[in-house]
Image (cartoon, rainbow, N blue to C red):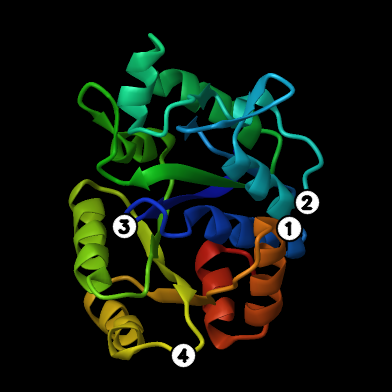
Amino acid sequence: MSRGVFITGTDTDVGKSVVAAVIARLAAMAGLNTGVMKPVTSGCSQRDGVRISPDAELLAYGAGMETLSPQATPYLFTAPLAPSVAAEKEGVRINLEKIAGDYDSLAARHDFMVVEGAGGLMVPLAGGLLVADLILRLNLPVVVVARPGLGTVNHTLLTCLAARQMGISVIGVVISGFPDDPDEAEASAPHLIGSLSGAPLLGIFPRIDLADPCHVVDAIVDRIVREPLTTILRKELGLV
């Protein structure tokens, strides 16, 4: 089985997909055959009448993959709601064993897997099952993605604390969307998170205002590839 990492967030829309795609790119740059997975997508898009996950496609772009296996996106729902609610609207129940089976099949074909969750640890998938339960089932360590603004310290510390209490290994934290001209709250967040979360600060990814998320990934990689924190990120992920 391959090595791998699960990308979770302190909330929705914190930049998980971009961070996951950047990590997939770093793994590919390290010479690893990198696979990707987005187990559950709510609010999916359609292309030629077929449901697709833009998040999964961005991960595939980061990994340098030309095509995505259906196993990379086992659950695709149209409603932009919590996964359990979106699934219920379509008469579907998310099954962790199906996701685990698809993951195992992908992992057997790749050196390193990047799996992106939905929202944060406590997002409900089915009944009492949470994203955290999926992480435990896949037996993957997590990278926590956080936003830089006011409130992020509390959200990030709570996420790291909850993960450890549930037996989930936290590799570290990446702050996503950090502005070139941060305000006082943004400027102080990285030090506070790094010193109080109990997990290494693995990266401060810049805010890139480009319409195409693929170009955002390219620009971030170009910006961070020589930064000291990126060396730490690679080391903690086992990419060196």
Q: Secondary structure at mark 3?
A: loop
Q: Earlier in the sequence, mark 2 or mark 4?
A: 2
Q: Earlier in the sequence, mark 3 or mark 4?
A: 3
Q: Earlier in the sequence, mark 2 or mark 3?
A: 3
From the viewer's perspective, is the residue at label 1 or at label 4 nearer? 4
Q: Disc 3 marks which residue?
A: 10
Numbered circle sitting on residue 64? 2
Q: Mark 3 and mark 2 in contact (Cβ < 8 Å)?
A: no
Q: Mark 1 and mark 2 in contact (Cβ < 8 Å)?
A: yes
The Cα atoms of the two marked residues, 3 and 4, are separated by 23 Å
Q: Tell me: residue 181, above or below residue 41.
A: below
Q: Amino acid at mark 4?
A: Asp
Q: Earlier in the sequence, mark 2 or mark 1?
A: 1
Q: Amino acid at mark 2?
A: Gly
From the viewer's perspective, is the residue at label 3 or at label 4 nearer? 4
From the viewer's perspective, is the residue at label 2 or at label 4 nearer? 4
The Cα atoms of the two marked residues, 2 and 1, are separated by 7 Å
From the viewer's perspective, is the residue at label 2 or at label 3 nearer? 3
Q: Disc 1 marks which residue?
A: 28
Numbered circle sitting on residue 181? 4
Q: Residue at x 27, y 65 (%)?
A: 156
Q: Amino acid at mark 1?
A: Ala
State left or right for residue 175 relative to residue 197. Answer: right
Q: Tell me: residue 162, above or below residue 146.
A: above
Q: Residue at x 49, y 25 (%)?
A: 78
The Cα atoms of the two marked residues, 3 and 1, are separated by 26 Å
State left or right for residue 113 relative to residue 62. Answer: left
Which quadrant, please, contains the C terminus? bottom right
Q: Secondary structure at mark 1?
A: helix
